[in-house]
Image (cartoon, grey):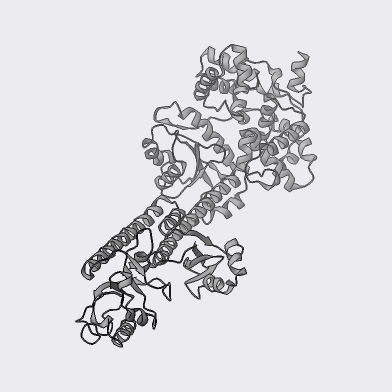
Amino acid sequence: MLTLHDLTEGIKPTLHYLEAPVSRAPRLVEQVVVCGDSWTPSAGAGDGQVRGALVIAPAEASWLNTPGDTERRMLTLERQGAVGVIVASRAKEVPELALVASRCGTLPLMVPAIASSAASLQTLIQRHQIEALRHHARQQARLLEMAPRLDLTHEGPHRLMRWLERQTGARVTVIRGRDDRVWQAMAEAGHDRLLADLRMGRISAGMLEVGGQHCLLHTLGGTAPYRILVARRPMPWPYPARALVPKVAGQLTLVSYQVELQAREQRLARTEAANRTAVLQALMSGDLVQAERVAAPLLPELLATGAGEICVLECSSGDDRRAAAAACDQALGWKALSVLCPTDDRHIVICRPHTDGSPNALELLSPVLRSHPQRAIGASMPLPWARTAEGYSGAIKALANARTAQGRIAVHSTGKPLSELLPGTAKAWAAAVLRPVWEAVETEPERRHLWESTRLGVTFGPMRAAKLLGEMQPEGRSGPHRNTVAKRLLTVSQRAGLGRNLGDRAVLDLAMQLVDAPGELATLPVCTPSLHTMLQADSSIAEWASRLLEPLTPEQQELLAVWMSREANIQETAKTIGVHRNTLRVRLETVAAAVARPLLEPGNGSHDALFALIVKGKLPPSILPDPIAGIPYAEDARTAA
């Protein structure tokens, strides 16, 4: 990989041109040959034997000093492919006949920078040749080593391009289309056709000069339209640097292909994750038709059984949620849908079809827990898919208990909820509370949409509900926007004659649990029973409250009562009992685990605890407003008090 440019340029050149060469094109030196008196075109070098050779001739060689013979032999060397002739003498000692003969062709005539014999000059040039080959080998090894490493580290082609810049002294860029500034500059110089040919793959490489810059161009990619690698430098390109560009272009194509493949895989993974989330959101809103349509490419048999188990896996700190979700899919035989929970960055929601006689999900998921002892999982009992939101709520409640349970596994209790323990007139009461809300909405789709967002809003809080529903932020930015759900929730509360306090939300939650859907309101009788009377109507309600509070000590029950009376506000409660809010949070987490309710998050976990405290006389009934009985909003009651 040694060229005449390497021998004649630089701070300490080995050779000097006697006259400026006709062509500055790089000439590759493949061999070094000494041609003395014994050399003749017929005997010493047949056709091709001096191809790529740098010929060294002693100054006293007879063929350099014989008229006619000098010119004939110089032309023969040129015809046979020699790259140049060196006269082993000082410049002033070069025979005049040699100078005249060199002017007849294009073969350059040179002398050593330091006077040397033909043999020593041959040895010196061969050493340069060996060093050039070693440099080329190191360069190739570095290139072959770098490309796979870039693939493994996902660094992309930029590091390889910077390396090419350092090796060649050029500026390297990639043209991706006509809008690129480099393309436009070259097109203005009249090279638009060449760029178009490269872009469409009609040629693979090109060379041009623009604005004093010598440019090498090479296509990148596997199919048209191709990207174009452009390497620009102010000096002409020597052969080794010029030969390096297509090799780097080939490696860049491979690296870019891997980067594009990885980007495509990431897009597919994001699309699949979005589809999984969409299935969960459709199930949470009760839209089984949409859920089945979206789930068909992922898990066609998901809704075939009509019922399913909902599990919530809580990952440990620093855990890889995607890897944990993949482990859940594998443990369940790829017959369940694992979704990265949109409401909590630690949670994975698992929806598994339920069939009689099959092992429950927790048995199959136990290896996933054993591999990471800090994980915990809560599960619901099998429920119809239309009640997925209820199952998710149960799994969240079970998860609160699982954090402190042995094995960190818990199943939501099968005990009846408060709404199923109330007397038969409770449905009529709920209808009377909710009927003004739906009468104010004109169309059935609007009623359905308002019902879904309100039901999830009172069950899980506005933030969690917004994420479960997949709401959009203003200006079309994707992501949850809790204000949308909060506004709908406030609208429904006000139309029902309620406010925005904890007691108001608990009453609204209870009313919506008693009515399965907006359409049921028209079929229920109109009556006005008292909520407070209904809460004391049956001993089973008191037993339900006792079971819920039984795991708590008297001190913990008192703490829970203060927490509820202060609207579940950390700052206000900590100030009331005189402890730091972090201390209060730890105590409340203990209480939440004992009652298996997520008390630190808005939703029906706190509502259950509030009802239980009121039924057991730990809090006054006035905290619960009853719009049907004419009891004012909770904030008005407090003001009056």
**Between 571 and 126, the one nearer to me in the picture:** 126
**Between 241 and 4, the one nearer to me in the picture:** 4
Looking at this rendering, what residue extends furthest in the left direction?
A: 38
Quadrant (top left, top right, bottom left, bottom right) of the C terminus: top right
534 sits to left or right of 554: right
Q: Residue at x 68, y 38 (%)?
A: 485
**Between 631 and 19, the one nearer to me in the picture:** 19
526 sits to left or right of 385: right
Residue 47, position in %: x, y?
27, 85
Q: Is 501 above or below relative to 327?
A: above
Q: How many marks?
A: 0
Q: Is residue 413 visible?
A: no
Q: Is residue 206 visible?
A: yes
Answer with the quarter of the image where residue 431 lies.
top right
Q: Is 182 above or below relative to 333?
A: below
Answer with the quarter of the image where residue 497 lies.
top right
Q: Is 585 above or below relative to 19?
A: above
Q: Residue at x 49, y 31 (%)?
A: 399
Residue 74, position in %: x, y?
32, 82
Residue 331, position in %: x, y?
40, 45
Residue 32, position in %: x, y?
26, 72
Q: Residue at x 30, y 61 (%)?
A: 137
Looking at this rendering, what residue extends furthest in the front direction?
A: 92
Q: Residue at x 73, y 39 (%)?
A: 521
Quadrant (top left, top right, bottom left, bottom right) of the N terminus: bottom left
